[in-house]
Every structure is written in C-alpha cells, then in structure tokens.
Image (cartoon, grey):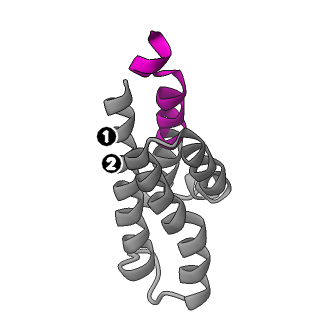
Amino acid sequence: MRRTGLTLGVIAGLFSIVLWIILVFYNPYTASSSKVVAVNTFFMLFLPACLAIVSSIMNKKYLMLAAFIWSLPISLYLMLTPGIFSWFIASCITYFICFLLMFFSKSKREIT
C-alpha cells in the first residue's frame, strides 16, 4: 500500500501541475491570461501539487493531508466550471486517498 500511495501521489501532483500549466499558459477559454490569476492559482494549485509530490517521495502523510486541505477550496470552485479544469478535483481527491493509504499502511517496524 505504501508504494501505491507513493505512485498515486506523484501522478496526482504531476497531473495537477500539467493542468495548471494549461490553465495559465494555454487556456482555451480565454484570450489572454491575467497575472493575478497566475499568481493565485500558483499558490493554490501548483504549490500544493509540489507538496504532494514531495510528501509522497518522503512518505510524510501529514504533508499530503496539508496538500489536500490547501488545494480543496479552489478545486471545489473549479469543479463547478465547464471544461477540463474541473479535473483539478480529481487530483485533490487523490491527495486524500494517498493520505489514507499512507495513514493505514503499516511499516515492518510497527508490525513486530
């Protein structure tokens, strides 16, 4: 289960980063991107994705929970929009699933 949590966390973080790049630089729904939108989404989507990747690699379950809580408000907002950006909620939910996998996985030291 630990390896599954690690893999899912890295994939969800990378998926969120790719979606953020599309949102900021290649947004098919607007003609130009705003610096305010780029900065806000950088702090609310990109940084939690980086935190999720780091917490997966370091196996730090509470950092994964922090990434989930941090990205949840804007992910819920984007879930209600039409288009591909509603997929941000999928990576956010995956952060929580990874937290649960990390939380309930037993290491060899805890079993003995």
Judge whether 106 appears above or below 28 on screen: above
Horizontal relation, residue 15 to residue 80: left or right: left
The residue wearing badge 2 is 11
Q: Nearer the viewer, residue 21 or 47?
A: 47
Residue at x 47%, y 59% (from the top left corner): 49
Horizontal relation, residue 8 to residue 99: left or right: left
Q: Amino acid at mark 1?
A: Thr
- Give me the disc on residue 7: 1
Q: Quadrant of the N terminus?
A: top left
Q: Nearer the viewer, residue 24 or 52?
A: 52
Viewer-nearest of discs 1 and 2: 1
Disc 2 residue crowd, few under 14, some 14–19, many 20+, Cα 10 Å: some
Disc 1 residue crowd, few under 14, some 14–19, many 20+, Cα 10 Å: some
Residue at x 46%, y 44% (from the top left corner): 90
Q: Identify the residue at the far top of this view.
A: 112
How many labels, in total? Answer: 2
